[in-house]
Image: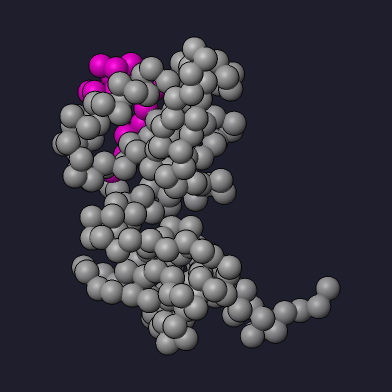
Amino acid sequence: MATLTKSEQRQIRNEAILSSLDKLQFATREHLRQLHDLAGVRNANRILSELETAKLIQSFRKEAKIYSLAKAGRDLIGSTQEVARKVSYIEHALLRNDAYLRLGMPDDWRTEERMRFKVHGETVSITPDATFSHGNIMTFIEIDRTQSMRENRKKLERYAHLLPLIEQQFSKPPIVVFFTVSDSRKRRIKQACDEYRVRAKVYTKSG
């Protein structure tokens, strides 16, 4: 098998980074560094700067630089996805990335995909913030950043209704994973999950 040249290796790495940005929509340097083993901060900055100079990615700065695909980058990998740059959505997407990394970067990670299920002859839909399967167990991800507990309770009420029916269809009990921003919110969500008897795990970035 022929050894790849440095240029070919760089091309493969660059396209992998572009594909990750297409999947995640927005990402920080630290997200991309962990995803693609970009070694130290200095090396990661160099690689991302090269991609930005080539106009394959674009960035803006908040607390840290935030990257997304530029048009040339989308064209290169054949992506047709364009995402809104609302600050609230970007913060939501970045926290979802933290969940993606924390949960082991599942291969079948899908974001905001509407799922439909038959309930007593009717089609009921739900759109989690992300979904994936682990050991054939369907997992629903909910990102809780600034959402009211009232909204969380409405979600849990829906899950309490749907999860037993989903289990009947797939023969294994699904699970809900909440990823939130503070220990106090984590405690409140856990309490609500218990009240609604929803099988769930709740994480923050720190634990």
Residue at figure coordinates x 25%, y 73% from the top left: 61
Residue 18 location in percent, x, y? 51, 69
List the single residue furthest toward the front: 122
Residue at the far right: name it.
1
Judged left or right of residue 63, residue 143 is: right
The answer to whether residue 114 of the structure is visible from this angle is yes
Whether 146 is drawn above or below 81: the answer is above
Where is residue 43 drawn, in percent x and y? 44, 80
Q: Can residue 44 be seen in the rendering of this structure?
A: no
Q: Is residue 163 magenta?
A: no
User: Furthest residue to the top?
Assistant: 120
The N terminus - image quarter: bottom right
- Residue closer to the observer: 4 or 153: 153
**In the image: residue 181, left or right of residue 179:** left
* Above/below status of 49 relative to 168: below
Quadrant housing residue 82: bottom left
Please name the residue shown 50% across and 30% down the image.
116
> What residue appears at the point 52 percent right and 15 percent down from the top-left corner?
121
Using the image as rendered, state which of residue 113 and residue 164 is in the foreground: 113
Is residue 201 inside the magenta stretch? Answer: yes
Q: Is residue 25 above or below residue 13?
A: above
Span shown in magenta: 191-204
Quadrant of the snapshot with the C terminus:
top left
Residue at left 30%, top 63%? Answer: 85
Q: Which colour scheme appears in the figure?
A: one colour
